[in-house]
Image (cartoon, rainbow, N blue to C red):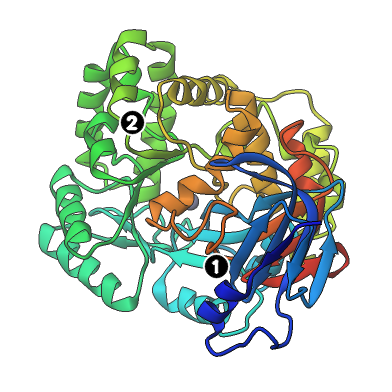
Amino acid sequence: MKTVFVVAAAVLLFGGCSQEGPARGTAITNVTVIDAVNAVREHQTVLFYGDQILAVTSSESLFPPPEHTIDGSGKYLIPGLWDMHVHLTYDDAFTESMPAMFLAYGITSVRDTGGLIDKLRPVIEKMRAPGAVAPRVFYSGPLLDGTFVVYDGKSRPEIGTQNATVEMAQQKVAALKDAGVDFIKIYEMVSAEVFAALVSAAQSHGLPIAAHVPLSMLASQVGPSVDSMEHLRNVELDCASNSAELYEERLSRLKNDAGASGYELRSGMHSAQRVPAILNYDEERCERTIASLKATIQVPTLRLVAYPLRSSYDHPDWNEALAQVPDTLKEDWQAATAEWLGTSDRGDTTVAQWSLSLVGRMHAQGVPIGAGTDTPIARALPGFSLHTELERLVEAGLTPLEALESATIRPAEFFSLQDEMGTIDVGMRADLVLLNANPLADISNTREIAAVITKGHVLLADDLK
Ligand SMILES: [Zn+2]
């Protein structure tokens, strides 16, 4: 039997601990390790202590022996998952329970893509408190909107702010940097001028950029300036043979002569133009548009946009999931489920079909895809919905390993953290998910969770219920 000595790493990491010192850490033994870079490694022992992986080895024993051992025989170990698109403060009924719900489903990191700083701050502080058992959280603060604000607190929750001028945009980004944000999120009502100001301010402050394509711009103009694009929104216009005509109409609507609210303006444009653009799909034009997005992570949120075709309500695990909905919302969610299951009318599925096929096309052309859900918007259950998203990504044409990549490597890359997160290697963060079944055989096996390791804390299946 070969023995691996992990002392050198331990001394390096913990300073001063000697060979005779107490055994440290937890080892998961005889496990199949799967990540998107190293693919499959069988019969491995993975040792971690604190928030770091100390060894990944095929040897059967470690010296000194670890303090704790988890038998990984017949199990699969993947890196902790990310949800790249969540809103922790969108619905007060969920804010408190969301971090634990994410962990229960193996989501050890989240990217909060829109919330007011004052509301987010206590939530972030609690999640980041030393010793807190909560996912890692990265946040943008509010949606940076234009003269008209969609999420203005009137018809929609207040998670957006106004950027009517270049000066406002510059000040806003500087203030967000001071407030400690990890990235910014650009929204749909900004002008091209304000968009450019936001991009250059973010770049000068070293902040990555997530964006919806502003309605005043084309996807191919926006993509190269931002690090991620959300929901595939507005790509359809840049793939349409009549895009020039639709775009002109858009610019005239944006003058907003009728004095509509930001929300009305935006939803009016989407309902008037999305389906007509999709019906005028132009393959050659779309190839060019997709080619312009090759360095921009697309977070399609298929669980949201392909909803009429593939609803969570139809999922075999949905009843189990419903039990986790906070009491104040339960009745509403149950009623919506009953209504869905009681009718065969799925409404217009054009956008849903288009979205699934567009993701397949983008993926085939090498566009990076990221996994996000928009939780808890449109009844996305925190945690559960990420697994739905992974299933949709596979349906769209990603392999199960590529779907895992979209929820591990891609988000790490968005934050330039790929040297710390996203794979199971020595020196990486101790965020791991132990599965009872092989996710490469069927991506829905990511739901078969035996244990979750978050920042080195071990949560066994019983702790997660
Ligand atoms: Zn969102």
- List x then y, in percent, for residue 21: 69, 88
Report the front residue among 274 and 37: 37
Counting labels gives 2
Q: Earlier in the sequence, mark 2 or mark 1?
A: 1
x 11%, y 64%: residue: 167
Q: Looking at the picture, does residue 155 appear above or below residue 135?
A: above
Residue 390 image label: none
Which residue was labeled with disc 1? 136
Quadrant where the C terminus sits is: bottom right
Amino acid type, mark 1: Arg
Which residue was labeled with disc 2? 294
Quadrant where the N terminus sits is: bottom right
Asked whether mark 2 lies closer than 8 Å to ligand 1, one says no
- The secondary structure type at the circle numbered 2 is loop
Report the front residue among 179 and 334: 179
- List x then y, in percent, for residue 17: 60, 88
Please state if 26 lies on the left or on the right of 131 as rendered.
right
x 72%, y 51%: residue: 58
x 56%, y 74%: residue: 8
Amino acid type, mark 2: Lys
Please state if 68 lies on the left or on the right of 41 as rendered.
right
How dense is the environment of label 1, judged by Cα within 10 Å: few (below 14), some, or many (20 and up)? some
- List x then y, in percent, for residue 36: 57, 41
How dense is the environment of label 2, judged by Cα within 10 Å: few (below 14), some, or many (20 and up)? some
Q: CA distance from mark 2 to mark 1?
A: 27 Å
- List x then y, in percent, for residue 186: 31, 52
Report the front residue among 448 and 338: 448
Q: Looking at the picture, does residue 310 appear above or below residue 200?
A: above
Let me know if residue 130 appears in the view.
yes
